[in-house]
Amino acid sequence: MKFLGIDLGWKSQPSGLCYLQLIDAKLQLIALDRQEAIADIFTWIDACVQPGEPALVAVDAPTLIPNATGNRLPDKLTHKYFGKYHAGCYPANLGLAFAERTVNFGLELESRGFAHAPTIAPQKLGRYQIEVFPHPAIVNLFNLERILKYKKGRLGDRRQELIKLYNLIVDVLPHLDLPLCCGDVLTGEIPTTGAALKATEDQLDSLICAYVAAHWWYWGEQRNLVLGDRTTGYIVIPQRI
């Protein structure tokens, strides 16, 4: 089974991309990438997963937006359950500039056979997609008291927070019940300039997305939370360790 993580740029920004594969009961990190154009993202997806091949694609973006204004139910629920960790998500509605891009991304995945999976039979082969959100996933996977604040603030502070995330990925994920083997894909070099740091951030976020995809497929609701549903929009989050 293959798992793709897409840290989708909601406007015109590049997107982080991660490809994991389950081999001999371990997740192998096959590739990290970053692409800007939507067409190039789908070229990458098609290269990783052949037509009809089973895979689960986890997208950090609101691909289901039923509401014209206000917040979706899953957006509200992230604030209810994860606000104390500073992990509430940005509101999504059809009136916002990014909505067409993110919804169309989900529709394009559906056209390739990746069905939304707010419920899933654990370890059943198929082609699925889910919406994920790295901040609460990181809080729960690593048992943190607050998010790692690598997205905003001074460059040096952001870099230190991103180093923490990198260290958690390489020190903790290989020892969980669904272990991750990073191989030589992760270099350990966290850049010191703004543009390069943002690129690394996007890729590490995509890795978290892909890991959540595998976590959802492997255990389903036994070890994951689902905020919302197919009608309201939904976000899949691993349960706290």
Image (cartoon, rainbow, N blue to C red):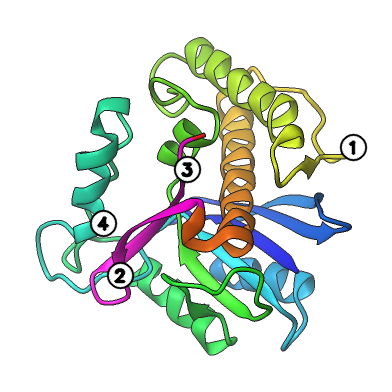
Q: In which quarter of the image is residue 141?
A: top right
Asked if residue 164 lies left or right of residue 88, the reply is right
**Of the residues shown, which amino acid type is indicated by label 4?**
Pro
Asked if residue 232 lies left or right of residue 187, the reply is left
Q: How crowded is mark 4: few (under 14 residues within 10 Å), some or many (20 or more)?
A: many
**Residue occupying image coordinates x 76% and y 23%:** 189
* Distance (Cα) linking label 2 and label 1: 38 Å
Which numbered disc flags the more N-terminal residue, 1 or 4?
4
How many dots with numbers? 4
**Residue occupying image coordinates x 72% and y 88%:** 52
**Of the residues shown, which amino acid type is indicated by label 3?**
Pro
Residue, disc 3: 134
Q: Residues within 10 Å of mark 1 (few under 14, many from 20)?
A: few
Q: Nearer the viewer, residue 164 or 122?
A: 122
Tag of residue 229: 2
Q: Residues within 10 Å of mark 2 (few under 14, many from 20)?
A: some
Q: What residue span does the magenta drawing correspond to? A: 223-240
* Distance (Cα) linking label 1 and label 4: 36 Å
Q: Which of 223 and 85 is in front in this view?
A: 223
Position above or below: 166 against 55:
above
* Distance (Cα) linking label 3 and label 4: 14 Å
* Distance (Cα) linking label 2 and label 4: 8 Å
Which numbered disc flags the more N-terminal residue, 2 or 4?
4
Position above or below: 47 against 35:
below
Residue, disc 4: 74
**Local secondary structure at mark 4:** helix
Circles 3, 2 touching at the beta carbon (< 8 Å): no
Tag of residue 184: 1
**Of the residues shown, which amino acid type is indicated by label 1?**
Asp
